[in-house]
Image (cartoon, grey):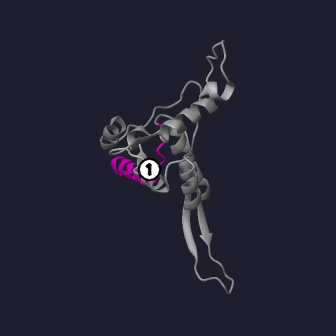
Amino acid sequence: MQMILQGPSITSNKGKNQAALSLAQLASFKAVKTEGKRSRANTSTTNKHSKNREPPVPVYVGLTIHAQTRKKELVERMHSLGLSISYKRVLEISSELAAKACRQYQHDKVVCPMKLRHGLFTTAAVDNIDHNPSSTTSKDSFHGTAISLFQHPSEHCKGTERILSPELEVEKIS
């Protein structure tokens, strides 16, 4: 892919070219294989990629577009161009991540960010969230609590990663 982008060269470029890496991933993602007997009348093809061998670029593009816009049509348009995973796959990945987080919360018996580390000085900011509109057009009020956690890593104390629940550790390996 680098040769396509930059042309043939006698000297070897040992540095990584991100554009070439991304194009290579997209090419492997959209590689197809023919099913059944191939004839001129039957040119049916299916995508070759599988869930456990998805290249990172199309997954990243699909998840990022969905996270930023929440637009099914945009994700599907990018998928039809071969630049992204499908909207259905985006939802599958989101559901898998949410289920893993819930299992971790059940294992820990506490809901906290998955990236929270052990052994770090942690502070919290707690505040009420009150919305009690007094206008004549308002219909509902809301009361809640917002909690923000802040960890303070230092050069000599970076903390340790949290231990995954046994069920998640097995999934991580497979």
The crowd level at tag 1 (other Cα within 10 Å; few <14, some 14-19, many 20+) is some
* Residue that mark 1 sits on: 93
**Depth check: 88 or 166 in front?**
88
Q: Amino acid at mark 1?
A: Ile
| Side of 4 where 43 appears, left or right | left
- Say which residue appears at 50% left-offset and 48% top-offset: 85
Query: What residue lies at 54% left-to-right and 52% top-to-bottom?
Result: 80
Would you identify the image quadrant in which residue 71 lies? bottom right
Residue 83 position within the rendered picture, expressed as x and y whole percent measured from the top left? 56, 45
- The C terminus lies in which quarter of the figure? top left
Numbered disc 1: secondary structure: helix
Does the magenta portion include 141? no
For this rendering, which residue is in front, 31 or 120?
Answer: 31
On whether residue 95 falls in the magenta region, the answer is: yes
**Residue range highlighted in magenta:** 94-117
Most common SS among magenta residues: helix
